Image (cartoon, rainbow, N blue to C red):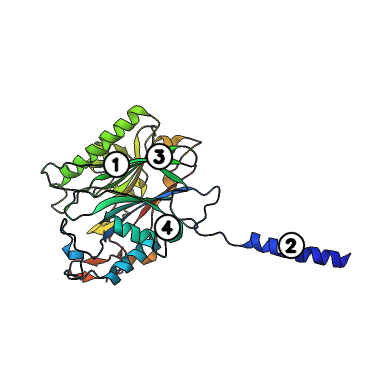
Amino acid sequence: MKIRNILFAIALLPMLAVVAQPANKNSKPAKQPFVAMFYNVENLYDTVNDPKINDDEFTPSGKVPWTSVRLETKINHTAQVIADITTPAMPDLIGFAEIENQQVLEMLTSSAGLSKAKYSIVHYDSPDERGIDAAMLYNPATFKVVTSEPLHVTLPDNDLTRDILYVKGKLNSGEILHVFINHWPSRREGSEISAAKRMAAANVLRAKLDAIQKLDKSANILILGDFNDEPSDKSITEGMKALSPDQAISNNSLYGLLYPEFKKGEGSLYYKDWDLFDQVIVSGNMLSRKKGLRTSVTDAGIFKAEYLLFKNKTGESRPNRTMSSDKYFGGYSDHLPVFVKFTL
C-alpha cells in the first residue's frame, strides 16, 4: 500500500511542475486589466537623411552625431519602458509622440524587448516640418482596429504641425473604444503667442468628438497625448472641454484623470518647474458606470521609474533625457510616460 502511494506521488510530480511554472510576462490572465499608455519618446529618428523633412540633426553627420549605436540604445530604452510600465503583462495600447516614421516603429516592435508582444502599428506621415508624428502600437489579441485616420490641424499662421491620430477599435468584451493620440503645437514661441495654435488643435479634436457623440452619446473615449498645455489651460478646459474629475461626473463629458497629480505639483516634464503636458482624458461614462469598460482616477498615473530620472547638482530629480542642444546624455526622454488601466 505504501509503495502504491509513493508511485502515485511520483506520477503527480510532472503535473505539479507545470502548475508551478511562473506566468509568461507577455501572457494576459483572464482578469488582467486593459492598459493604455502614452509616451513622448523625444525624437525617435532613424539615421538616414530624408530630403523631405528637416532631420539633418539626426544623422551621423549631425551636430550631435546620431549613429546606429545611439539609435539602438534609444530603441532598447523605449522598449524597456514599455515592458516595465505595467507588469506582468505589457500594455495593450501605446500612443507615441515624436516618431519619425514607420521604420523606427518596426525596429521597436521587433526589438528584443518587445518582439514577443507582437504589437501591430497604426501610423500616418504628418506634414510636420521636422517629420515627427503621432503613432500607436496595439496588441491585436485584445484590441481590433475598426478604422483609423489622421485629423489634420490647420494653424492660424498656416504653420505645419502634427496630425491628431484617431483610432476606433473593438475590445475583447465587444465594446468599442475611440482613441485619440495627440501632440499639439509647442510653446517654442512663448506660451501666450502660441496658445492660438493649441486651441486650433483642440477645436479639431472637439469637432471629431462631437460627431462621435452625436451618433453615440455613451461612446467610450480615450484621449492621450502631449498637449503642450496644462490641464487648467484654455485649450483643454474650453477648447476640448475637459474637466477635473473632482466635479460631478456627466456621462458624455470629458475628465482629466491626472488632474489630482497636477494639483499636487506633479508633472511629466521639467522646464523651470514641473509641467503636466502629458495627459490621460476619458469620457465620464467610464468613470460612472458599475459594469462594462470602466476606470478611475486611481487607475491612472505618471510612470516615474528611477532610471527615467537623474539628480541635478542640487539633488532635484529631472527627466533623464537622450540629448540636449549639443550634448548627448544617452538617457530615455525629456518626458515621463503616463498610463491608465481599465476594468473590462
Mark 4 residue element: helix
- Residue 306 in picture, x, y percent from top left: 38, 65
Disc assigned to residue 177: 3
- Residue 167 in picture, x, y percent from top left: 34, 42
> Residue 78: which quarter of the image?
bottom left
- Please indicate whether residue 250 sits to the left or right of residue 174 in the image: left
Q: Nearer the viewer, residue 187 or 214?
A: 214
Query: Is there CB contact under 8 Å for labels 4 and 1?
Result: no
Query: Is there CB contact under 8 Å for labels 4 and 2?
Result: no
Mark 3 residue element: strand
Amino acid of disc 1? Glu
Amino acid of disc 4? Ile
What residue does disc 1 label? 149
Estimate the spatial distance between the alpha carbons at disc 4 and disc 2, rounded to whole Å. Answer: 37 Å
What residue does disc 2 label? 12
Estimate the spatial distance between the alpha carbons at disc 3 and disc 4, rounded to whole Å. Answer: 21 Å
Query: Is there CB contact under 8 Å for labels 3 and 4?
Result: no
**How packed is label 3: few (under 14 Cα within 10 Å), some, or many (20 or more)?**
many
- Please indicate whether residue 168 sits to the left or right of residue 70 in the image: right
Mark 1 residue element: strand
Estimate the spatial distance between the alpha carbons at disc 3 and disc 2, rounded to whole Å. Answer: 45 Å
Residue lying furthest left = 157
From the image, state whether disc 3 or disc 2 is nearer to you: 2
> Residue 256: which quarter of the image?
top left
Question: First in sequence: mark 4 or mark 2?
Answer: 2
Question: First in sequence: mark 1 or mark 3?
Answer: 1
What residue does disc 4 label? 85
Question: First in sequence: mark 3 or mark 2?
Answer: 2
Question: First in sequence: mark 3 or mark 4?
Answer: 4
